[in-house]
Image: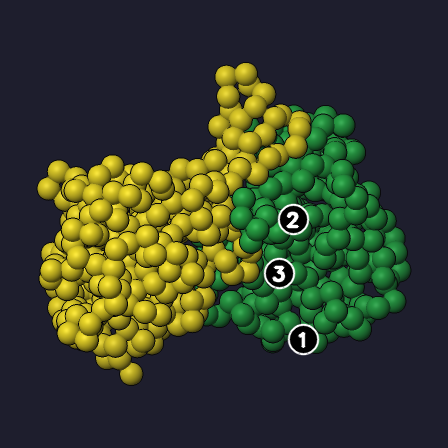
Chain colours: A green, B yellow
Amino acid sequence: MCQCCAEKKDIYLPQLATVADISQMNATEKYLRLAMEDGPFDYIPGQFVEVSLAGIGEAPITISSSPTLGDSFELVVRKIGRVSNAIHNLQRGDKVGIRGPLGQGIYPVEEAKGRNLVFICGGIGLVPQRSFIKYVLDNRGDYGDVAILQGTKSYDLRLFTSEIEAWSKRGDVQMLETLDEGDARWKGNVGVVTRLVSKVETDLKSALILVCGPPIMYKFVLMALAEHDVPHGNVFLNLERKMKCGVGKCGHCQINHAYVCMSGPVFRYSDLASLPEAI
Amino acid sequence: MTVRKITKNDFANFVEALIRTEKVIGVQAKWDRFDFAPLESAEALRLDYDVTLQPPKKYFLPPAEVLLTFEVGGPYQSQLDGQEFLLLGVHPYDMVAINQMDELFRQDNYDTHYMTRRNHATIVACDVLRPSDHVFASSMGAAVVRKGYDVLLTDVGDSFLAEAATPKGEKLLARAKAVPADPQALKRREDVWARNKKSLNRHELKCDPAYLPKVLAKSYKHPVWEEKAKTCFSCGSCNQVCPTCYCFNVQDDVNWDLKTGQRVREWDGCLLDGFTKVAPAHEFRKARADRFRHRLYRKAAYVPPKIGGQIACVGCGRCVGACLPDIANPVSIYNQLIDDLGIG
């Protein structure tokens, strides 16, 4: 190998991590806690990793834990494709490959300090948002009002129910939850998550709004926010795309000129104006 | 650096000597066309070619390459191809494309797989003798090139002029029997450049390529995308022959032991259906017209900011010849937009 390349790291080379914890969350979601073999793993809320299963392939997954967790990090994976199916078969102690953390489009951790925050989550949109939610709650004094809006399709698909319950009981978080489909076991709100927007007690216009959910949800959330005159610069959307390399080369995640793996996955809504393919 | 003059006979001897000691890739006839392939004799080298079927990109970004090997549960091992080789006969438009690829694979996240191959290559570029049927390199400012190569060759009739641009090139040319180029020969080289700057232009772009990003800025909803895409087969031929297309897929291959295997990078194409498809079935850029538009926008709007404003189409014309329904020609599309919307 030439000297010039010998000194560079291979951007496609995964590092090994051990599955420290793995559990089934509901019919389709699996929770994993991973620990890197070669020491600490520093990341910022919003960043993702490429999870690599030898012989199966790689999949980009946003980190669900907050860096405040410490040495390990958490992922939640829906069983949906080839790699995610294989992830669901992992056992505690198994090894996986990890590349990352990746993504320069992160949650506005610094900008949000002192500001009121509203998290709007649809379904497993809670998973990436949880990284920033937990970061904010672990540094509660640095941030203003916090409202968390969670919409889930049905009762059995709810995630992190004990954490949601704990957040509801805190006096310093407005936790609002709704189900698309009513259920005898459910006494709370029924309807889509946008119906919760007008129930937010903090001033929406001056708050930072963090949104993550299925693509269909974004337009309705943006319409609801428009009714409250929320400036586009205050809204952050978490986008997903097909991704292979995760490092700005392979072209799969491109939204017009922007690579989700490089400029995202978290985008400021005002920056998406020039990206008609975004939503 | 000094320009040397090498008679054609001496050049053939020089190439024969190189073949004996180096891995030499050169342009050769392939049926009634031309292509880059390992060179076995100086006689087979065809520096009078018009265009090759595939650009030389494949020697830096192969159609399929092993990135890593692995053992299930064990560490992954990088696989880098550090074999020295000589690439003989790269036309200026392909050299411009290689220069652009170098920048794209070097920037932000340095791609050691591409760069290792690139750093082990010695490139001998050569000026074009006869234009291909669809070349428009003159329109794209890529008919003549003055950087990126180690040696530039120009056929000036009875001999070649050879100019080394790097120490590697100097070392290479030291092995050729040569004399310093005389003023008449240098004048003939200037004439070749002047001629090629105009004549490699079977399709003429109606504006300086620098205006193309501005043209595209107002063309997103133009009907041309739907019109052209109506007959697009989504076959990806335009992607496959393009010297500046570099999108790729990555897949794992498992060996017979079901324990070891390799992670393989393969060319992909943004025109192909499924390029943006995620599990279980959502495809972000599904419409054929949107995929068709994406290729033309990549060339003249999305990639240029990454490469200092250059347009990522070098006018080789390969896509024009490769496209069955004849809709791929970037010049005809850009010209239609210029006619309809102006360049301002």
The residue beneath circle 1 is: A205
Camera-near label (1 vs 3) is: 3
The CA distance from mark 3 to mark 2 is 11 Å
Q: Is residue A63 above or below residue B139?
A: above
Q: Quadrant of the N terminus of chain B?
A: bottom left
User: What is the x, y in percent for residue B115?
Assistant: 48, 51
The residue beneath circle 3 is: A104
Camera-near label (2 vs 1) is: 2
Q: Quadrant of the C terminus of chain B?
A: bottom left
Tell me which amino acid carries mark 3: Gln
Element type where label 1 sits in the image: loop
Tell me which amino acid carries mark 1: Lys
Element type where label 2 sits in the image: strand
Q: Residue at x 28, y 43 (%)?
A: B17
Q: Residue at x 86, y 63 (%)?
A: A140
Element type where label 3 sits in the image: loop
Residue B123 visible in image: no
The residue beneath circle 2 is: A100
Q: Are marks 2 and 1 in contact (CB under 8 Å)?
A: no
Q: Chain of mark 1?
A: A
User: What is the x, y in percent for residue A159?
Assistant: 72, 42
* Residue sitting nearer the eye, A145 or B240: B240
- Residue B11 falls left or right of residue B170: left
